[in-house]
Every structure is written in C-alpha cells, then in structure tokens.
C-alpha cells in the first residue's frame, strides 16, 4: 500500500509540479480552497484526512503579494495567516509527524542572510511566524527557505519576469547588470531536496532549516546572456540601468547534508531553460478537422496526440475524468475545436473554449496555442475568433500563443467546400460556378499546408508567447485567384455577384514574426496546375 502524502495548494504551478512527481510513488491528497477534483479537500475540512495514516505533509500553498504596497502586504499576511492556522489544526488533529514547509528567503532582512525580518504585516514575517510555530511542535519539521524558484511560466522573481518579457518580445530594463547573483534554484533541484528529505526520514523530533541555492555567483548581465542564447529570436530592446542595489547572496551549503550537490548558477539557468523550451506531451484538441489532422500526420513520430468531439463531449460544463486526465498530462495544448452550427455559432463556440479552460485544472501550467484568422471581414467567423482570443488571454496566465493565420490550402483531409483555393479547385474540377462577393476584390493571403506545418515545427521548438499575425503566403485577390484557376482549367468558373463594396484587406504588418518564421513559401500557381492536370 502506498504511503499517504498531503500537498497544500492545487492550482499553483509549484503545487501541481510536486503532485505530478509524487503521485507516482505515493497516495497524494491535495488540500485546496476550491473543490473540483476528487482528490482535493477543503482547508476547513478534515473528514477525508481523519483516521488516515499521513506519512508527510507538504505545506506549499501561500498567497504572494502582488506589489510592495502596504495594503497588498497586509492582504497577503492575513490570507496566509488563515491558511497556516488551518494547517496547524489539521496537523494536531491528525497527529501528522512529518512536515515540509515551503518558507522563503524573505524571512531575512539583510543581503548576507544573517538578520531576520522584524515584526510586521509582511509576507516574510508571516513565513517566519509559521516556522516558529512548527518548530515548537513535537514533530519532524523540515523548513525550506526557498530563493527565486525557476520553473516554466513562473512568476514572482526577476528572472521569471525577464523570461516573460522575452517570450512576449517586450522591452527590458536590467538594473545593476554587474552585480553578482546566486539566489536562485531550479524546481527540479527543489524536488531532489524534498525527495531526499522524505526518503531519509529516520530520526524523531528532527527540526532542520535548509537554505538551498546555487553556487558560484555570476554577474546579472551574464545571466541575461544565458537567457538570450535560448531566446535567440528575441525582437525587443534591452537597456541597462544603475540603481546601486545589491541582490541577496546565499552563502549556505546545507543541502549537502542530504548528499545533494549544489548546481552552479549557470547550470541552474541552463536546466531551467531546457524545461522552458521542451514540450514532452503536445495535445491537439480538434484533431479530426482539416488543420488538426494534418498536424498529427506531419508530427506522427513526435509526442503529439489528438482528441476530438467525435470521442468526447466538450460542450458539457463538467468533463468526464478520463478527458480531464488526458488534458492534465499535456504540456502544450493546440486548440482547434469548432462547432459548425448555423444557429448561435459565436456563442456556442465561445462556450466551447470557456468550458475547456474551466475544466482544465492548473491551466496556468500549460501553454495554449490557438489558431485564429487574419480575416478583417466582420462576420460570425471573425467575431468568434475575437471572442475566443479574449477568453484565452484571460484564463491562460500569460502562457499563450495566438497565431492569426491566412487561408490554408493543400495537404490531406482537404475541406472541399471552403471559400478559398481548396473549394475553388474542387468546383473547377466539377465545372461548377463560383459566386464572388465584392466583385472578388477582397485580398487574402493563401498559405500552403506544408509551409504552415513547418511553422508549427518552429513553434514547438521555441517558447514564443503573445498574439501574432502571420504575414506569410501568396497574397492575392479572389478574382485573380480564380483567373489563375481558369487559366489551368480552361473553364469559365465564376460569376460576379453582390454589391461592389470597398474591398477588405488583411492586416499583415507583423515584420518581426515574418522574420522569425523565415521559410520558403510554396508557389500557388504550381499547386493549382498540379491539381487541375
């Protein structure tokens, strides 16, 4: 029988990381303020814990202040005070003997980590109070004063914040670039420490405070250089600024008590970046559609899987556990799912992605790639994509990439009736007329499926975030496109119908993304000729 471990927190990146790691060896319960998973329980409830032999409790959950303002610090203090008191009640009621508390280096008030923070309503002082209460109890308390923790899509420390700006190509200002720094730790190294504590748990009434960090401090500008080696497509501007501030230097080496070697700062940064850029499991949602099926065919050797509405009900508010599990196991989600209904098209497709995001536990630990449109025509299709983009930005914790793509043609599983190259060629083969609106003067860019899949390959190998218009392909009006088809089919295939309104052009001015996705574009004339031979 597996030993039982409790982890506080469930929606946070760090808590979810430890849950995924530890559940392979232990029976893990997640303690949460919200109850939307079977293995979660409320902080103010002990029913599911009572009469269970709990091996370890990992107290990870906390509310970090969103700014340095007094109001935000006080808010953080009060929320964490309530969480900590509930945890202490659970420990005493259930006679839990082993506790690992995720504290913080903010308990120190000086750069050399020799002075403790003074009494105040701050995040650091709240951590210190919890440490003191745990040390007074008759149990094994292992306190980890965690420095800047580096993990995918992390937040709260300056390195993670810099990486966010690199992902979104935002301008960056580096303060005091010549200062030395080592107050950081990769999340995988933190797991090594926690795992070693759990395995080496042999002593009774053992209280240890660990100050984990990286060794061999390096200059901040060297750290930036290491980040840029990986974010080598960064298109923003970097400025340096002297503030004469000092960053904490950790002189401790106590994790070697657990026979764990400290990594150098350079190695810590490298491990962190390797994780930032690696997607072990990619999930295509809407894999039976035109684009989704081509992605799976193209990447069949890679770790990419697909699910669709033919196998699962995505329109339900509450997903089945099997579907949730598939989503949970993915690192990157390519969302392509659409409901092709004539009635309530926009609202139904909006609800489709909203349900998905709400049913995906720890969505902030996963990256969402959403394929939108470059079309500027104000119709239901464009409106649907605009609303979906808004909801993704709201729920994805800034871990998203929205690609607004032109009209795709070619490949497998072709849509034969779309208003574009595929549909026009299909009708030309059948000698059927095509009705053009706006006298065919609307200009659209057409991108070959094979070229689009090369772009997806680049996306899978680079941690780009944000919303981008893809200005790549053959730019041409619909009437000129049909004339090309006529030249090869020798048939008069189109009628000019509708009002002669002002033609709509696409907004294709994203020079950065054009330079980044530097690929050779297939010739549309050659494709049309091959199809109409």
Image (cartoon, helix red, strand yellow):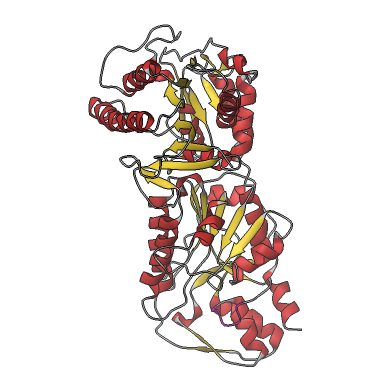
499 up-or-down from 302: above or below:
below
Towards the viewer: 72 or 97: 97
- Image quadrant in which the C terminus is located: bottom right
51 up-or-down from 533: above or below:
above
Magenta-colored segment: predominant secondary structure: loop
- Image quadrant in which the N terminus is located: top right
Q: Is residue 238 left or right of residue 124?
A: right
Towards the viewer: 437 or 154: 154
Res 429 quadrant in image: bottom right
Q: Residue furthest left?
A: 71
Any part of residue 168 in sight: no
The x, y position of residue 492, in whole percent, is 62, 91
Q: Residue furthest front?
A: 51
476 up-or-down from 264: above or below:
below
The x, y position of residue 402, in whole percent, is 49, 55
For the point 33% across and 24% down, the residue is: 123
95 up-or-down from 280: above or below:
above
Q: Is residue 272 left or right of residue 469?
A: right
Q: Which residues are magenta?
A: 415-419
The x, y position of residue 206, in whole percent, is 49, 16
Res 489 quadrant in image: bottom right
For the point 60% across and 25% down, the residue is: 196
Towards the viewer: 312 or 402: 312
Any part of residue 399 in sight: yes
The x, y position of residue 487, in whole percent, is 68, 83
For the point 45% across and 63% down, the residue is: 319
């Amino acid at each position: 029988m597996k030993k039982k471990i409790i982890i506080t927190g469930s929606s946070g990146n760090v808590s979810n990381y430890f849950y995924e790691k530890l559940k392979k060896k232990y029976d893990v319960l997640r303690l949460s303020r919200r109850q939307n998973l079977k293995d979660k329980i409320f902080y103010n409830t002990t029913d599911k814990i009572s009469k269970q032999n709990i091996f370890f409790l990992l107290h990870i959950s906390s509310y970090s202040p969103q700014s340095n303002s007094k109001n935000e610090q006080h808010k953080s203090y009060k929320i964490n005070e309530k969480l900590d008191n509930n945890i202490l009640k659970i420990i005493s009621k259930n006679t839990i003997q082993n506790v690992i508390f995720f504290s913080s280096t903010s308990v120190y008030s000086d750069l050399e980590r020799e002075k403790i923070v003074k009494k105040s309503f701050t995040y650091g002082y709240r951590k210190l109070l919890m440490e003191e209460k745990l040390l007074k109890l008759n149990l094994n308390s292992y306190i980890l004063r965690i420095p800047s923790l580096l993990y995918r899509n992390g937040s709260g420390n300056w390195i993670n914040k810099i990486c966010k700006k690199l992902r979104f190509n935002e301008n960056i200002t580096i303060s005091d670039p010549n200062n030395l720094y080592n107050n950081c730790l990769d999340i995988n190294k933190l797991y090594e420490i926690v795992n070693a504590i759990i395995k080496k748990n042999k002593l009774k009434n053992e209280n240890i405070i660990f100050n984990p960090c990286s060794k061999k401090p390096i200059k901040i500008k060297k750290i930036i250089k290491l980040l840029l080696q990986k974010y080598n497509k960064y298109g923003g501007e970097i400025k340096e600024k002297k503030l004469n501030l000092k960053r904490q230097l950790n002189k401790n080496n106590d994790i070697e008590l657990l026979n764990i070697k400290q990594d150098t700062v350079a190695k810590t940064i490298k491990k962190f970046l390797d994780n930032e850029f690696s997607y072990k499991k990619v999930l295509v949602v809407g894999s039976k559609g035109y684009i989704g099926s081509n992605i799976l065919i193209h990447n069949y050797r890679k770790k990419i899987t697909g699910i669709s509405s033919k196998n699962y009900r995505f329109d339900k508010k509450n997903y089945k556990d099997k579907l949730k599990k598939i989503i949970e196991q993915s690192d990157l989600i390519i969302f392509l799912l659409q409901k092709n209904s004539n009635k309530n098209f926009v609202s139904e497709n909006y609800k489709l992605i909203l349900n998905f995001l709400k049913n995906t536990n720890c969505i902030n630990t996963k990256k969402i790639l959403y394929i939108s449109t470059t079309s500027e025509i104000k119709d239901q299709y464009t409106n649907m994509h605009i609303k979906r983009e808004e909801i993704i930005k709201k729920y994805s914790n800034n871990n998203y990439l929205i690609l607004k793509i032109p009209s795709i043609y070619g490949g497998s599983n072709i849509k034969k009736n779309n208003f574009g190259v595929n549909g026009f060629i299909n009708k030309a083969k059948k000698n059927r007329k095509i009705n053009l609106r706006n006298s065919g003067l609307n200009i659209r860019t057409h991108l070959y499926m094979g070229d689009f899949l090369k772009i997806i390959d680049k996306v899978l190998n680079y941690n780009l975030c944000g919303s981008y218009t893809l200005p790549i392909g053959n730019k041409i009006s619909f009437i000129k496109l049909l004339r090309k088809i006529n030249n090869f089919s020798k048939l008069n295939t189109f009628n000019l119908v509708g009002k002669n309104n002002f033609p709509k052009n696409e907004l294709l001015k994203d020079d950065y993304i054009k330079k980044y996705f530097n690929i050779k574009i297939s010739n549309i004339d050659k494709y049309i000729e091959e199809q109409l031979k």
